[in-house]
Image: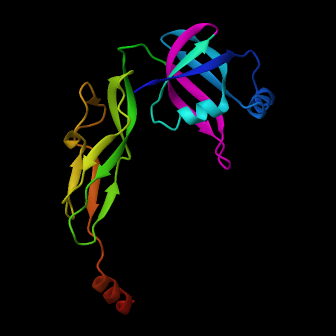
């Protein structure tokens, strides 16, 4: 995973009024914390940050007053209606340090014939990985799975250096039997 460099400006103003003015100016209020240091309140360029956050668990290199801080997003707040960034919490990480993050689960392959449905019990899998080597996603093959089949967390193939941060027997995906057209008609005539 590559680092995305973003300039940050420290801020001394707080509150709704400042936050609104910052967002109108294209900036997003944020706080940087971690490793026992005092939290640093900053503003970040809104468009650059929004584009960077399109990648799950992105690694950001912030330039804060001449020093570089390596951070990952811990909490992202968005406006409920318009979707723009309201505030971001960023966690300081060090190279080689292990962090626990949620990685999106992607599927590949086709289910067995029969109109079965795939239920995602976990859309993101909690894993522990080195901060500079967080996988963008984990891929699970569902090829040929029939009704009633499940994929457990221990069955997911993880990249080297990545370990599960969830119970190994947690269900990630489950195949549910689809209702056939004949069953649907029988149920509608009974009703």
The single residue placed furthest to the bottom in the displayed view is: 189
**Relative horizontal placement of residue 120, taking residue 15 as reference (left or right):** left
**Which residue shows up at 61% across the image and 21% down it?**
31
Q: Position of residue 106 (x, y in %)?
A: 34, 47
Between 3 and 27, which is closer to the camera in this rendering?
3
Task: Name the dominant secondary structure of the magenta segment.
Answer: strand
| 37 sits left or right of 165 in the view | right
Please state the horizontal and vertical placement of residue 68, each as a whole percent of the image. 54, 11
- Residue lying at 72% horizontally and 16% vertically, measured from the top left: 11
Q: Quadrant of the N terminus?
A: top left
Q: Is residue 136 above or below residue 97?
A: below
Vertical order, 3 against 156 (above or below)? above
Q: Quadrant of residue 129?
A: top left
Was residue 67 drawn as part of the magenta stretch in this picture?
yes
Above or below residue 12? Residue 77 is below
Q: Quadrant of residue 23?
A: top right
- Which range of residues does the magenta coloring cover? 65-91
Camera-side residue of 58 and 92 = 58
Q: Name the residue at 47% across, 36% down.
A: 55
- Residue 15, how many percent across, how many down? 76, 26
Q: Is residue 9 placed above or below 169 in the rendered structure?
A: above
What's the image's color scheme? Answer: rainbow
Image coordinates of residue 50 in percent, x first then y, are 59, 35
Query: In the shown orientation, is residue 14 left or right of residue 49?
Result: right
84 drawn magenta: yes
> In the image shown, does 83 or 39 lie closer to the viewer?
83
């Amino acid at each position: 995973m590559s680092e995305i460099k973003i300039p940050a400006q420290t801020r001394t103003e707080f509150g709704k009024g400042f936050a609104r003015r910052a967002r109108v100016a294209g900036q997003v209020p944020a706080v940087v914390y971690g490793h026992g240091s005092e939290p640093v309140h900053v503003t970040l360029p809104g468009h650059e940050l929004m584009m960077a956050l399109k990648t799950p668990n992105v690694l950001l290199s912030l330039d804060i007053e001449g020093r570089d801080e390596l951070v990952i997003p811990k909490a992202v707040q968005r406006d409920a209606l318009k979707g723009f960034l309201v505030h971001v919490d960023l966690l300081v990480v060090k190279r080689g340090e292990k962090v626990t993050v949620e990685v999106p689960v992607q599927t590949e392959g086709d289910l067995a014939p029969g109109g079965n449905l795939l239920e995602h019990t976990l859309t993101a899998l909690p894993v522990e990985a080195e901060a500079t080597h967080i996988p963008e996603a984990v891929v699970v093959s569902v090829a040929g799975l029939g009704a009633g089949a499940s994929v457990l967390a221990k069955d997911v193939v993880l990249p080297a250096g990545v370990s599960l941060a969830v119970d190994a027997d947690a269900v990630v995906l489950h195949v549910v039997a689809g209702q056939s057209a004949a069953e649907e008609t029988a149920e509608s005539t009974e009703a």
